[in-house]
Image (tube, rainbow, N blue to C red):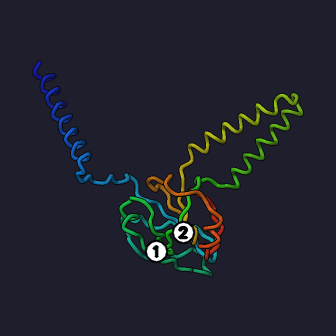
């Protein structure tokens, strides 16, 4: 009998402590910000050969240089992470070009997405031709449901407008806006072709 009573007493103490913390927060008490459990993963692109280069974890190296593997180019790319990026709290400044303009999209190869849509349309037309036009809509709906589930499972990636640097595992990535061509036209200085590889 002593064991359950002791356990109940400890749970009561913990509940009271939680209540005190909630009341302190409601009264304007300082609350320590939560730290995101995963460090931000950053990838840059070489302006000459378009090679994708992963940067070292921001928590281990705040600034430095990386080089591409092209034997003829050997371009070096300097980077410097902001305090927010090093603490894995978000992306407020680009580690490569110091720009503050970012957009978010799904971390998925867009060419593969277009291929899936084309395959769905082709199979829908084939089903309509082989089994009758009544199968056109069900096949299209099935591919639409598959695309919806796939889009929900693919994580987002935050991208710099100016230099195409990619930031993965960014906390609250939904707070960034989607791609805006007007901002891209204003801020783009280095055009690169990204191969969206996770």
- x and y, in percent, of residue 111 in the image: 70, 55
Q: Residues within 10 Å of mark 1 (few under 14, many from 20)?
A: some
Q: Is residue 123 left or right of residue 175?
A: right
Residue at coordinates 79% horizontally, 33% vertically from top-left?
A: 137
Q: Is residue 50 left or right of residue 34?
A: right
Residue at coordinates 38% horizontally, 70% vertically from top-left?
A: 61
- x and y, in percent, of residue 16 in the image: 18, 35
Whether residue 62 is situated above or below residue 120 in the rendered picture: below
Does the residue at mark 2 contact the one at mark 1 (Cβ under 8 Å)?
yes
Residue at coordinates 58% horizontally, 68% vertically from top-left?
A: 161
Whether residue 125 is situated above or below residue 27 in the rendered picture: above
**Residue tagged by mark 2?**
44
Q: Is residue 18 left or right of residue 85?
A: left
Front-lying residue, 89 or 181? 181
What is the quadrant of residue 180 in the picture? bottom right
Query: What distance separates the C-alpha of mark 2 from that of mark 1?
Result: 9 Å
Q: Which element carries disc 1, helix, strand or loop?
A: strand
Front-lying residue, 92 or 128? 92
**Residue tagged by mark 1?**
79
- x and y, in percent, of residue 17 in the image: 18, 39
What is the quadrant of residue 120 in the picture? top right
Quadrant containing the N terminus is: top left
Q: Which element carries disc 2, helix, strand or loop?
A: strand
Q: Residues within 10 Å of mark 2 (few under 14, many from 20)?
A: many
Whether residue 55 is situated above or below residue 104 in the rendered picture: below
């Amino acid at each position: 009998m002593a064991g359950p009573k002791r356990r109940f007493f400890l749970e009561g103490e913990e509940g009271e402590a939680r209540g005190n913390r909630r009341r302190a927060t409601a009264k304007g008490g300082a609350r320590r910000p939560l730290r995101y459990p995963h460090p931000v993963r950053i990838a840059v692109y070489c302006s000459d050969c378009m090679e994708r280069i992963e940067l070292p974890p921001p928590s281990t190296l705040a600034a430095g240089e990386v080089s591409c593997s092209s034997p003829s180019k050997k371009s070096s790319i300097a980077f410097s992470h902001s305090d927010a990026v090093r603490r894995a709290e978000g992306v407020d400044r680009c580690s490569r070009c110091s720009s503050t303009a970012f957009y978010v999209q799904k971390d998925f190869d867009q060419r593969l997405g277009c291929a899936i849509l084309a395959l769905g349309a082709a199979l829908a037309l084939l089903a309509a031709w082989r089994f009758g036009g009544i199968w056109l809509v069900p096949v299209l709906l099935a591919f639409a449901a598959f695309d919806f589930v796939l889009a929900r499972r693919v994580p987002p990636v935050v991208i710099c407008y100016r230099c195409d640097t990619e930031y993965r595992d960014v906390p609250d990535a939904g707070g960034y806006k989607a791609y805006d061509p007007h901002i891209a036209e204003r801020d783009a200085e280095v055009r690169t072709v990204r191969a969206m590889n996770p």
